[in-house]
Amino acid sequence: MLNKVPEVTLYFWIIKILATTVGETAADYLNVNLNFGLTNTTYVTGALLIAILVVQFRLRKYVPAIYWLAIVFISVFGTLITDNLTDAANVPLQTSTIVFAVILAGVFATWFAVERTLSIHSIVTSKREGFYWLTILFTFALGTAAGDLFAEQIGLGFFVSALIFAGVIAIITVAHLRFGLNAVLAFWLAYILTRPLGASIGDLLSQAKADGGLGLGTTGTSYIFLAIILALVVFLTKTKRDVIEVQRGELDAEAV
């Protein structure tokens, strides 16, 4: 099958950060504003995520609407995994951050041991796609825990935390563009860090001013960001600017 993920462009990073922000605000919106409760919200979003991933796996190529819908829901579900551990099971954020980091490292190690590549330009088999989405899930869970750890438990606040994560991403970008940092390593480091960045931005916009936010609320923030995501996905669907035009043989040659 053709490559199942989008090319890494500016549009990719914009939608990714927007989706991570929605993951934070939408989880709170469903849990608190609509009174679903943490458990019911987890069950509902988990079931919807499974249904979307089934569709995604059955496709033979990258389809922007399905791919980014899966990203939005996996963002929400990844947030809920951490929220359940923190709020329901009383697991400290330091513990969940370390545990998710170890699990994510294990997923990366297993993926590379089996496929000999971690490149997103090589997602051309169902096995590789499975590793890809498992990795994405734990980047979201880890990012949520790390974002909350910095902003709330350490007490840096949402704005300062967002600046820190954005600054580290900028350093990684410069290291790749100017100093030759491996492209695959740079991509995954930046991808992991966009989650706590998005979580910090989401909390900064949605939380009450008394809690260090701007007071826009989870409802308004979620709807605004979802509308922007929808507009960008429609644009990419029409223009195909994020479709990877690489043949299978070339993929395997450049994968590592």
Image (tube, rainbow, N blue to C red):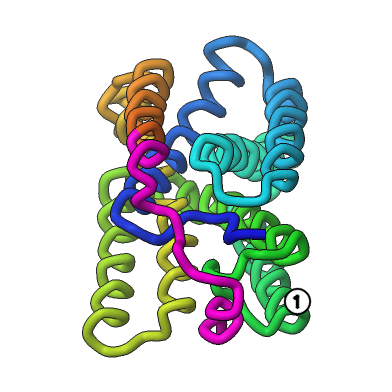
Q: Which residues are magenta?
A: 235-256
| Horizontal arrangement in the rendering, residue 125 relative to residue 169 (left or right) | right
Q: Report how many numbered discs are placed on residues in the image.
A: 1
Residue under the image location 56 percent in, 76 percent down: 251
Residue 127 visible in image? yes
Q: Nearer the viewer, residue 99 or 126?
A: 126
Q: Is residue 155 above or below residue 256?
A: above
User: Is residue 245 rendered magenta in the image?
Assistant: yes
**Residue at image coords 44%, 45%:** 152
Residue 44: x percent and y percent? 73, 23
Dot 1: element: helix
One can see residue 154 in this view? no
Front-most of residues 54 and 197: 54
| Residue 16 in picture, x, y percent from top left | 42, 47
Instruction: Report the quarter where the C terminus lies.
Output: bottom right
Residue 81 is left or right of residue 170, and the answer is right
Instruction: Report the residue that reaches farthest toward the top.
Output: 34
Query: Which residue, as the protein is rendered here, is positioned at the far bottom?
Result: 179
Q: Position of residue 247 (x, y in %)?
A: 54, 71
Give the vertical position of 32 relative to 134 (above or below).
above
Left/right of residue 163 with respect to residue 28 in the rendered view:
left
Left-right relation of 70 to 225? right
Q: Quadrant of the N terminus?
A: bottom right
* Residue at 32% over, 49% down: 11
Using the rendered view, name the quadrant where residue 194 is placed.
bottom left
Q: Any magenta on residue 251?
A: yes
Query: As shown in the figure, which amino acid type bears the numbered disc 1?
Result: Thr
In-front residue for pair 114/57: 57
Neighbours of disc 1 within 10 Å: few (<14), some (14-19), many (20+): few
Q: Tell me the residue that label 1 is attached to.
A: 110
The residue drawn where x is 77% and y is 64% is 127
